[in-house]
Each structure stands twice: as C-alpha cells, then as structure tokens.
Image (cartoon, rainbow, N blue to C red):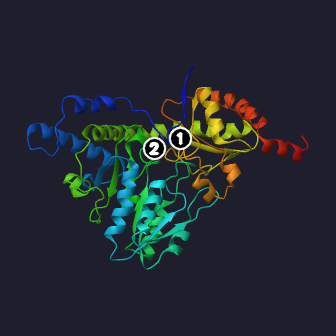
Amino acid sequence: MKRIYLDHIAAAPLAPGVFEKMRPFLETDFGNPQSLHSDGQAAAEALAAAREHVSALIGADPGEVIFTASGTEANNLAIKGLAQAQRAKGNHILVSAIEHASVLNAVKTLEKSGFQTTIVPVDGEGRIDPADVVVALRKETVLVSVMTANSEVGTIEPVEDIVREVKAKAPGVLVHTDAVAAAGNVPLDVRALGVDALSFSGNAFYGPKGSAALFLKKGTKLVPQIEGGIQEGGRRGGTEDVAAIVGMGEAARLAAKAMPDRLVRMTALRDRLIEGLPRAVERVRLTGSPGRRLPYHASFCVEFVGGEAMLLSLDFKGIAASSFSACTSKSLKVSHVLLAMGLDHTLAQGSLIFSLIDSTAAADIDFLLDAFPPVVERLRKMSPLYTDFLKEQGR
C-alpha cells in the first residue's frame, strides 16, 4: 500500500543531502569541538559553518545563535532564562492562550517562584490582537512570548506589529517568539520582527530530529538552564551534537534556497485541500485563518466524529495525519488551542491536521479527498450525535 505522509508538524524527512553532510561526524570525524587538537578543531570548524547557515536563515548574526536539542528546550531556555535574568526589574510575563506546552508549562514553573502570568486571548481564527497584548502590559512586565505561527491551526501571528507596539509602550520589555512551525518554511528576519529571542527547530525544515536553536539578540541577558561547561558561550552546557548541528546547518542552507518555489507549490496544494475537503464532506469546518496561514498546513474540525477514530481509519488507508500537537496527542485531552478559539469540546474533539511535505503531490491530495468521505460516513453511522442531528433535520 502506498503511504501518504501528511504529518509534517510532528516530523519531517531529511532533505536530500543532509545525511551525507552528517555522516562523517557520526563515523570518522568524531572530535569534540572543545578539544585543542586537530580532530577537535575540525569539529569546531564544522560547528562554525553550520552556525553561519542557521543564523542566515533568520537574518541573525552567528554569535546570536545558541544550539539546543529541541524546540522545547529552546522555549524553556528563552522563557525561564530571560525571565530569571530580568527578575530585578519585575515578575510579570505575558503569553498567548495558544502557545505550545513548552511555553505554557515553563511559565507555570516560574509561577512557583513568584512570577505572575497573564494569558492573552485569541479570536476565532487563532489570531492574537496586538492591542490586547499592549493593554495587558504592567510596570512589572519583563517578558512577552507570542508564537510566530500555530502548529495546530496554521495561523501566522502579527508578531512584527506586536513587538512594535510593545516596545513603543514599554521599551525595556523583552519579546520572545516560538517560530518552530514557521522557520525554514516562511521567510523570517529577526531584525524586521524586532524580537529579542526566537526559537526554531531543524526537523521542521527537513533537518535531523534533536537539532534546534535559540536566537538571542546581542547584549540580551540570559540565565543558563543547563549548567556545565563553556559550550555555546556558556549559555548552554554539554558536549555539542556536532552531527545534528551540521545537519541543521545544511537543512537551513537548502531551505533558504528552496523557499521561494516551495512557498508557491505548497500554497497551491494546501488550498486544493482547504477548498476540496468541505465540498467532499458536509459539516466540516476549517480551523485557523483561511489566508494568513502556514503554506503547508490545512486543519479542520469534523462534526459528530472523534479525531482519533478518523486518524486510525485514515492510517488503515495509508494516510498519516494528526489531530493536534504531537507533544500532547496521546493525552486524550481536547486541544487548548481550539478551546481558546471558542470551539466547544464536542467539535474540538473532531480536529484533523494535514501538514504537507516536499514529496506531497496533487495526486496525494486527490487520493485523500476520495478516501475521506467513506471514512466519515462510516464513523458517523456509529455516532449518536449524528443520529440526533439527522432527526433534528428530519432526515
């Protein structure tokens, strides 16, 4: 059976050529970048080259990039490290209601040590209003964290507007953005955004799992969260995973080159799915912004059917998709993102996310559009909610 993989937000394949760049550092060039001998210096040079490529992807200087092992670690380093470094100035943090669990859980941990958090709401498309962020600022506010794009509903947030308005009212407040879902897939420039910190992950743009980074604007203070050696300028201890970092560097270089064509192609396929699925099945609702969304992302809520049942049925037909964030997908909880957007629990349980990869073809989208209606029809026949709906409609 042919497999159609539509779960980019959970994991993506390596771009062609990435593994070959990594291979020497897994087999022969195994030196420690901190070692003074030639083997160590070869690894250090590879690390520096990767840092150049990764920083260029987001318009940063190489010295402003801190390598981490995941986007989750980068978010924890940013939220905890920035807030703790600013503790003498205040103890208030602003985050949006749809942030990733690695941001929301990090602020919960900080609350145990005396920090206070304000959760900024979103509208029905998952969009954050810059005015709501500004209104929530206090004299004690030291940090604002608003994601660049949401991985569950695809909405791209007005980060540049948020930063501009926050800095106009409170110049000393730091702004962090979680750009894991966006970096390498849409153009990003940290100077244009104006952010003080930005988290991103190599796997999101066809690099290896376990490769990620935090952009930290030059001169911004940060309290390390992994204490040890002098790696990453003393901001993140631990022997560097040279192979993963080299892979991320190559993936970043390739992503920057491929992005213009990728944007056009992905957007066309995404729109084919966004337009086709609600036509193929009644009572299907698009979630997130129709236009201002990630080019590879299409998400829906299907009435009267549970997301898990649809995922298993689609998998049986050779289609891999997701219901919500892979970090919480097995918790059997309703998505906090959809609830924050105003969807009720019943509808939110029917969420589906299709996120395209480079190998996705128009024929794959058409196959999904053909395979999906029988899946929903079969599952709805077993749904008492759908039975009640049909009775109400006199059908």
- Residue of label 2: 185
Residue 16 as seen in the image, left or right of residue 298? left
Q: CA distance from mark 1 to mark 2?
A: 8 Å
User: Where residue 108 appears, x then y in whole percent?
Assistant: 46, 64
Disc 2 marks a residue whose amino acid type is Asn
User: Where residue 234 appears, x then y in whole percent?
Assistant: 21, 57
Quadrant assignment for the C terminus: top right
- Among all residues in the image, which is located at the extreme bottom? 139
- Among all residues in the image, which is located at the extreme top? 1
Closer to the chain start, of discs 1 and 2, is 2
Disc 1 marks a residue whose amino acid type is Tyr
Give the camera-side residue of 79 and 297: 79
Give the camera-side residue of 107 and 9: 107
User: Where residue 95 appears, x then y in whole percent?
Assistant: 49, 64
Q: Residue at x 68, y 32 (%)?
A: 372
Crowdedness of circle 1 by 10 Å Cα count: few (<14), some, many (20+)?
many
Quadrant assignment for the N terminus: top right
User: Where residue 377 appears, x then y in whole percent?
Assistant: 76, 33
- Among all residues in the image, which is located at the extreme right? 394
Q: Is residue 265 above or below residue 115?
A: above
Residue 249, located in which quarter of the rendered image?
A: top left
Q: Are marks 1 and 2 in contact (CB under 8 Å)?
A: yes
Residue 313 as seen in the image, left or right of residue 304? left
Q: Residue at x 21, y 56 (%)?
A: 233
Mark 2: secondary structure: loop
Q: Is residue 11 above or below residue 51?
A: above
Mark 1: secondary structure: loop
Crowdedness of circle 2 by 10 Å Cα count: few (<14), some, many (20+)?
many
- Residue of label 1: 296
Q: How many numbered marks have been drawn onto this rendered protein structure?
A: 2
